[in-house]
Image (tube, rainbow, N blue to C red):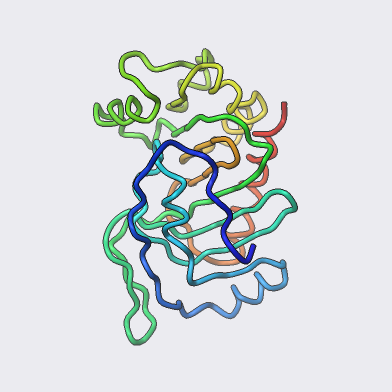
Amino acid sequence: MAEYPPPPASLPFNVAPGTVVPRKLLDPALVSWATGKGYVLNSYASAAWYQGWGPFTFLGEIQGVGLELLCDFGDTDLYLVEVYASGDISYDKQGHFHHGGDRKLVAFVTSPQLLHRASVWSRVDANVSHELGKTLGSLFGGSGNKPKLGDDRFESFYEVAMPTKEEGIGAMTPALKAMMIERQFRGILELRAGGFICAPLGSPPLDPTTLERTITGIGDLYRAAITR
């Protein structure tokens, strides 16, 4: 993964210039953990590459990115990155990190086994407004009644957006829906042909324990998404 692959195919999107992030002072324990796992820590992540995954349904605009962790699992690659939705990103002379807020830890997974498009947002976290309805109409080519999965229990917990019901059913496998409910997943999940994006709720710290738990959870969701 020396170079970023093309982002999975998505709808047309005008990508804003990427934010250049100076080198971050890395925690030696974090570096040691990543090296031992065979992962790569990158403090020069490409904001433009992540922006190129857009347009997003629920994730929102990516203004900049911070530290990035790259994990290679054969034909599946995981990019775990700090995403900032607003404000400037910079470092002072002492190496202290400054940003405008709205930080998320987001996983971007590339895999040829992902074939369908749908986006999910846990309802407990979603302040769905009329603006969201406009966004979904523009993303999925129309207005009016949006498609439903036909799974009342799942859709009572999650807001789901999809181009068609058939596409949504293809993306949201029974195994994936069952796991999300069983584990009470909170956050955003966006699937498309060739990849998916997962943004758990909150702004977790970048430490080995949290990252290990996050990678395991993302891996479980990915395996459920390709289980037919």
Between residues 36 and 115, which one lies in front from this camera angle? 115
Residue drawn 39% across and 82% down? 95
Q: Position of residue 181 (x, y in %)?
A: 57, 30
Image vertical order of residue 117 relative to residue 106, above or below: above
The mark total stands at 0
Q: Quadrant of the N terminus?
A: bottom right
Residue drawn 59% across and 53% down? 214
Identify the residue at the far right of this view: 74
Q: Position of residue 159 (x, y in %)?
A: 42, 27
Image vertical order of residue 138 relative to residue 98, above or below: above
Q: Position of residue 10 (x, y in %)?
A: 47, 38
Asked which quadrant contains residue 111, the reply is top right
Residue drawn 54% across and 70% down? 42
Left or right, 217 with respect to 136, comes to: right
Image vertical order of residue 221 relative to residue 36, above or below: above
Left or right, 128 with respect to 176, comes to: left
Q: Quadrant of the C terminus?
A: top right
Residue drawn 62% across and 32% down? 115
Image vertical order of residue 155 relative to residue 74, above or below: above
Identify the residue at the far left of this view: 130
Q: Position of residue 133 (x, y in %)?
A: 30, 26
